[in-house]
Amino acid sequence: MKVVVTGLGLVTSLGEGVQDNWAALSKGKSGIHTITRFPTNGLKTTICGTVDYIFNEPKSAPDLTQEMALRAGREALSQSGINGDFPGPLFLGMPPVELEWPDRINMSRDINGEIDYIALIRAAESGKFAHLGTKFIFGQIGINLSDALKTKGAPISMSTACATGATAIQMAVEAIRRGETEAAIAIGTDGSASPESLIRFSLLSALSTRNDDPTKASRPFSKDREGFVMAEGAAALVLESYEHAKARGAKILGVVEGCGEMADSFHRTRSSPDGKPIIGCMVNALNDAGLHADQIDYVNAHGTSTPENDRMEYVGMSAVFGARLATLPVSSNKSMIGHTLSAAGAIEAVFSLLTMQNSLIPPTINYETPDPAVPLDVVPNIARHASVSRVISNSFGFGGQNVSLIFARDV
Amino acid sequence: MHDVVITGYGLLASNGERGDIAGYPIFKHEPVEFETQIAKKSDLRQMDAWQRIGVYAAGLALDMAGVKGNAEQLSKMHMIIAAGGGERDTAVDALILNGIKQIDNAGAYLNTSLMSELRPTLFLSQLSNLLAGNISIVHGVIGSSRTFMGEELAGIDAVRIATDRIKAGQGEIFLVGGSYNADRPDVIMLYTSNGQLKKGDHAGMTLGSVGAFLVVESREHAVKRGAKPLAQIQSVYSDRLAGDVNHALNSLYTKANVARDTPVISSSSQAPKFAKAEKNFFKHALYDAADRIGHSMEAAFPAAICLGVQELHMHKSLVIAGLGHQVGEGLAHLTAEI
């Protein structure tokens, strides 16, 4: 069963919509900037790819996560030409949800004397904060989006850390392949930048601290890379069986040919040093697509700009592509849009499809100091014209999550 | 179409243990030696309660299915886990909330306090997908790892997707389930805000700490490796027909093509919005799972299936069904192995 893409939607720090995003990305523009949305005093990292043009005032992570997903979803639906009730389910990749500091602080204002959780429970009993019990449950964003996009049945919300967006696409592909539905919407979205989320990654020494020059901070595969840059965004894909798309005369934007995954049991935040899970994940995707590695024209890398990820991704790609890797274009969108976490797999899937459509490979920007340990053709700094018929897009995450997707230009 | 069978389950839940947070009753899980399933102290130290509960229950399920430590099986075993997450360091939260009241620049104070007070590893016990991550590390399940979020529906859909993938040949053996720690004042606070919890005369949910996991596989796969099927999963359905409880549940019975007089264990949350109508719909139920072990959100549906498997020596056919506390509903139809 062939699964095709008929609609795309994008929201990133570069802008809203597929067109604006592609224009910026193909010019090598960075969306990373100094954070202004919340106070950064005392933070080690004060830069981010936040999406600040959606709301005029600071909102909660669920609000932004949902609104970006909705806008990307509407754009994808509009391109697909499907109006009214959508004939399939929603697969939503999104960040975990939790009550936030502004709400906690707001609740504690009602407390006289010592504040602890028992006192907060008493404050909650007032009923003044009833909206929190709906807003901060994990399933609510999926329900709201499913209502707004008129998808069928129960939406599935998921998290596989930094591979989440790719997992959402994989889930949709599987549902179509097993004949459960003719169409599905896959969305990856993440609007969870906040002081606490930055601090969590800072405490694990995962973030770049190149605060003085934000657009230069994300430098995947460079020798002087020193961490990823957190970012926000959303992407949506309308997926259909080829027969369904053809029958309704839809324009086909590409094919999802293969999905692969493999979990890593080595460590909570680090990859197995032998690269086996990363290799296995890419090989599984190739097998699923029925392809050989030499049929891949371009790698849309996970390329986070952390010392560890980029080295391990190189190790994995070396095993899969062999000597050919030296001349295989490999670039990281994260050099421009940062690491959009739960959205990354979906955003980079959309960019992979646009790469093929436009015969233009987006660059890895900030590539000034090559790393001799990671000798790659990263498409340095400037986009490159090239006919690309197949892309593999990698997504790896904390908790041993690895997903690779293979997209083809032609049916 | 492949038959889907359960070859192992693990349930860590209350065996009569109860507790109380600020006057709200909870069910505590029965006390166990976590070391029996999580051998390394360094692993235990990295996990918070919900992860320990889940990794322990997953280990029980793998043991019963006879695949514990079997690298060949574990390397192709797919994992679908329903999880919430986000356990807080309540002492740090309280410290900051008390401090922030005395301070003019709340933002700066919050940042510097979090930087100095948060344990670096706390994040890894908060991330939703790190229950799955810990199961990979401790038990070696590495075929794949997916975490569903979204309270009761996440648990229902985890079992549904595993079942449907096996039926369609998208995988042969799965570990599926979830865990929940009810002994958390921050979740009591959240569900109190909109009156979901039972307290005194106020009807509502009683949360329970539960870990519930199933090993499910195709019948051919189970037979081939010499495993004994404990039950067959005929079908699992989920939906989100808002509002009318009878309509929502009847629709699932129709989809599953199962008779209304089939014995049933209710996975009702007992939340105020639906409790009465659900109780009425399931008036002939064997029992409400929540009456025995409390309501465990993401783990509730897998847990009710574990309880259901235990009842199948008495019944040929059994339904597990219920609504989520705010949204969603699900039904599983189990049959006995003769």
Image: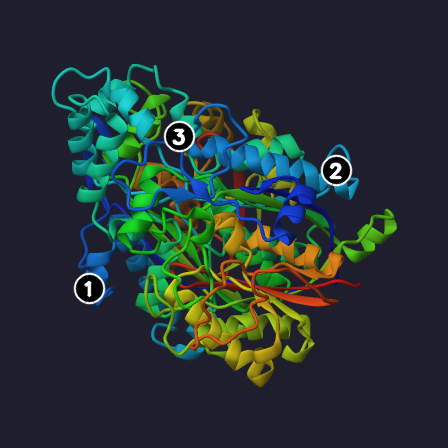
Identify the image quadrant of the N terminus of chain B. Answer: bottom right
Q: Which residue is mark 3?
A: B270
- Spot occupied by residue A290 in the image (x, y as percentages of width and height): 68, 75
Circle 3 marks a residue in which chain? B
The residue at the point 34 percent across, 75 percent down is B69
Amino acid type at image mark 1: Ser
Q: Earlier in the sequence, mark 1 or mark 3?
A: 1
- Spot occupied by residue A157 in the image (x, y as percentages of width and height): 51, 44
Instruction: Give neighbour class at mark 3: few <14, some 14-19, many 20+ (Cα, 10 Å).
Output: many
Q: How many marks?
A: 3
Q: Which residue is mark 2?
A: A78
For residue A128, above or below residue A398:
above
Q: Secondary structure at mark 2?
A: helix
Circle 1 marks a residue in which chain? B
Between A61 and A224, the one nearer to me in the picture: A224
Q: Nearer the viewer, mark 2 or mark 1?
A: 2
Between A230 and B250, the one nearer to me in the picture: A230
Q: Which residue is mark 1?
A: B42
Residue farthest to the left, as pictured: A113
